[in-house]
Image (cartoon, helix red, strand yellow):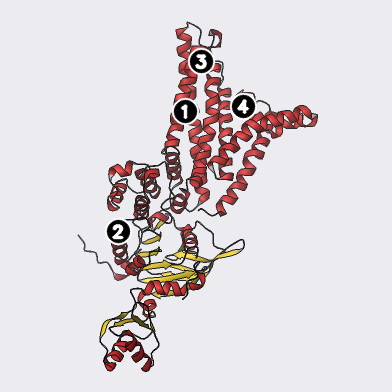
Amino acid sequence: MIIVDSLTRRYAGFTAVDNVSFTARPGRVTGFLGPNGAGKSTTMRVMVGLTAPTSGSATIDGVRFADLPNPGLEVGVLLDASAQHAGRTGREILTVASDTMGLPRTRVDEMLELVSLTPTEAKRRVRNYSLGMRQRLGIATALLGDPSVLILDEPANGLDPAGIRWMRDLLTGFAGQGGTVLLSSHLLHEIEVIADDLVVIGNGKIVASGSKEELLAAAGTLARSTSPRDLAHALEQAGIASTLAGDGSVRTDADPARVGAVALAAGIALTELRSAEGAGLEDMFLSLTADTQREGVAA
Amino acid sequence: MTATTISPDTIEAAPARRTIRPIPTTRLVKIELRKMFNTRAGLWMLISIGVLSVVATGAVLIFAPDTEITYGSFAAAFGFPMSVILPMIAILGVTSEWSQRSGLTTFTLVPSRGRVIGAKALATLVVGVASMAVAFAVGAVGNLLGSSILGLDTVWDISLATAAQILLGNLVGMAIGFTLGAVLRNSAAAIVGYFVVSLVLPGILALLAQARDWFADLQPWIDWNYTQVTLFDGGTDTAREWAMLGTTTAIWIVAPLVIGLLSLRRSEVK
């Protein structure tokens, strides 16, 4: 369990992380979302003691990361896959980490196999690795000590589709065994598929947090019909505000059951009716972080 | 045999998690030693220590006149490359964590930065002593070989005390490199910095000493090169000379190192 409590980190002139509090619970994957520069990485760096907080705290199972006797055995961390000595081989990087934690060397081979780095690749220097290979190596380092908590910053970056699928299964399995996973990503679809809980941060502040279902339920309903105008009209008559999107879909804050009932009463055949989950996370993300987006997307 | 029943209390009392021991310092030193030489640059540094000791010894054997086939000549020959390479090893051992960004992993696995830097200091000391032992040994073989080939008496004109001072002189050079590494935390800047304080600075101070009488008396107390060269010559004998070594060490190593470590412990690792 990771508990972040009133965490603030100020730099000269600006506040990167502003009074952030959230909990990542065991047995669940917590997705950490936010636009570029929102404070995700800073928060994660504070969690693992690489950056000192200005105020507030972050604890892992009740202990400050820096006070863990051998952190690698309890918390797997991947903050930046490219932050490795370019002149070391992949195997050597794992060996050094494994020796530091005091693990048997056999663990290195197990991890290389787990992340699908071949023995030949493991002998190459990291300088010659692709981003995807570095991510795999970073994940191997994080998992080396068989930790119960994982903190991963953009782990899917650079992975091929098969790699992304593999990572998703790995993290789901990890959480299924009672592990705590906190991962940040820009790949909203990825997060939507994998995360149980979401924490959304914008301009250093938490703008939303909760279970995925809760947050996405707020996104409302999407309905399609052969005559969208009639549907929108029927909804209006029933006192439900809706918007008619350019693609012929009708969006509303009401739940799908009500929309279906209205359509039935009005005798309108629906061709699609669902909670607006498909585009939900992206819409939610953009509207929640609208004030903090660089592009100034209208909510 | 007695069957033992485990009461529910005992189960609850048992720790749910495995007991985790702190990482011992000896392990950290071993890791840091390994990290000094498991990169291509590090490997070549290590190889060059061996190769240059042999080349320097060979050069004395080939080029030195018969009268110069003494242990002192061999020591002087391997002394120069050592005094350049060893500080480089000390610098890169510290700065690569920042310049190569491997510190992100290192300081996540061992959050106590003070312990990591301490382990690096011990590893640097081990490398310094071991490298000088190799150099002295290769020089000794050269001296024996040279004198027997040329049919001369083997001349051992370096006392144990002098050898110890040469070693200490090299350790001072490494400590300067280590300090620059800890203060600047950037490989290129620290290497340039090392050549500034070891090659440029002595010239300026010597010039100043010539121009100003009052500085001529002061120079041995503040010029670390001055006291290091005295060590290389095995000439640090009197209490006054040791005190000079003490003040130059305090000015160039202890004070900046303390400041560097204080900022290093608080700084962000990115």
Residue B221 is tagged as none
Whether residue A155 sits left or right of residue B2 in the image: it is right
Disc 2 packing (10 Å; few <14; some 14–19; many ≥20)? few
Looking at the rendered structure, the kind of residue marked 1 is: Ile
Q: Which of the 4 quarters of the picture holds residue A8?
A: bottom right
What is the tally of numbered marks visible in this picture? 4
Q: Name above or below for residue A78 compared with residue A18.
A: above
Q: Which chain carries label 1?
A: B
Residue marked by disc 3: B60
Residue marked by disc 4: B231
Find numbered disc 1 in the image and state the secondary structure of the residue it sits on. helix
- Give how far across and how far down residue A24 sits, in percent: 40, 68
Q: Do the residues labelled 3 and 1 touch (CB within 8 Å)?
A: no
Looking at the rendered structure, the kind of residue marked 3 is: Val
Q: Mark 2 lies on which chain?
A: A
Q: Spot the residue most to the right.
A: B213
- Give how far across and how far down residue B49 sits, in percent: 47, 28
Structural distance between the alpha carbons of marks 4 and 1: 21 Å
Q: Which chain carries label 4?
A: B
- Give how far across and how far down residue B51 sits, in percent: 44, 24
Q: Are marks 2 and 3 in contact (CB under 8 Å)?
A: no
Mark 4 or mark 1: name the one nearer the start of the chain: 1
Residue A161 is tagged as 2
Work out whether residue B8 or residue A241 is closer to the camera in this orientation and state it. Answer: A241
4 vs 1, front mark: 1
Q: Name above or below for residue B265 compared with residue B161.
A: below
Residue marked by disc 1: B49
Disc 4 packing (10 Å; few <14; some 14–19; many ≥20)? many
Structural distance between the alpha carbons of marks 1 and 2: 47 Å
